[in-house]
Image: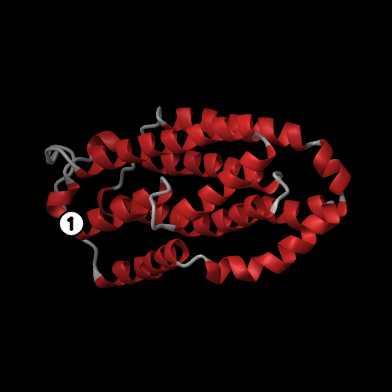
Amino acid sequence: MGGYGFLRFSIPMFPDASIYFTPLVYTLSVIAVIYTSLTTLRQVDMKRIIAYSSVAHMGFVTIGMFSLNIQGIEGSMLLMLSHGIVSSALFLCVGVIYDRHKTRIIKYYSGLTVKMPLFSMIFLFFILANMGFPGTSSFVSEFLVLVGAFKSNVFVTTLAATGVIWGAGYSIWLYNRVAFGNIRTSHITAFHDLDRREFMVFLPCIILVFVMGIYPEIFLNAMHVSITHLIEQVQ
């Protein structure tokens, strides 16, 4: 909703103020990307890791939006759509194992690939999407944001790009701790994989992430005219 507010109210209605406060927005966004990524590495609750990563991704959104060029704004809009799907799917993944084992603390989980292979594959897919793996929706959107930001401010782009590295770090760390290793039967004893209902909930998210990653023109073409008009208003 905040991103929508910037696009529909802040930038078109107050273009001079948006340009004036761009350095402030860049500063806050870079802090959000780096600080929350580092904070995410310290979390032990799976739900908190996903929540903090959402703050970092919103930092990318505001950086792209206030680059005030076509690539940056299109990337930020596509990232909002992508994040809405990927983050929701990751929260669903956490909900699946919480529903079975009644805890979100990482230290109680290990070796789920042995007992829950289908869940592990789906969880890995969305973990890769969350860290911007090529072929997923987040890769296209983050790349466009960085291209747009590079045209506006190289220094900000360099700092923001480190968020991609941090994102890969905490995403891989989370999956490694949950999926691999020896099963800790002293804490968790009941294992059963995804049922058909749960899989059908994940399926639309998987398809959308693939479509947005492989053929993003479906979404970008729909955005292009309105974004071009928005940039003309600012200029």
Q: Which three-letter amino acid code belongs to the residue tagged 1?
A: Pro
Q: Residue at x 83, y 37 (%)?
A: 20
Q: Residue at x 63, y 71 (%)?
A: 222
Give the image location of residue 32, x and y in percent. Answer: 58, 33
217 and 107: which one is in front?
Answer: 217
69 and 124: which one is in front?
Answer: 69
Q: How is the image coloured?
A: secondary structure
Q: Residue furthest front?
A: 151
Rendered position, 187 above or below 130: above
Q: Residue at x 53, y 53 (%)?
A: 141
Choose top left, top right, bottom left or bottom right for residue 67. Answer: top right
Inspect this view and state whether residue 105 appears: no
Q: Relative to 122, is 58 on the left or the right?
A: right
178 and 57: which one is in front?
Answer: 57
Q: Relative to 177, is 45 on the left or the right?
A: right
Number of numbered labels in the structure image = 1
- Which residue is label 1 attached to? 117
What quarter of the picture does the N terminus occupy? Answer: bottom right
Inspect this view and state whether residue 67 appears: yes
Choose top left, top right, bottom left or bottom right for residue 55. Answer: top right
Choose top left, top right, bottom left or bottom right for residue 230. Answer: bottom right
Give the image location of residue 2, x and y in percent. Answer: 69, 50
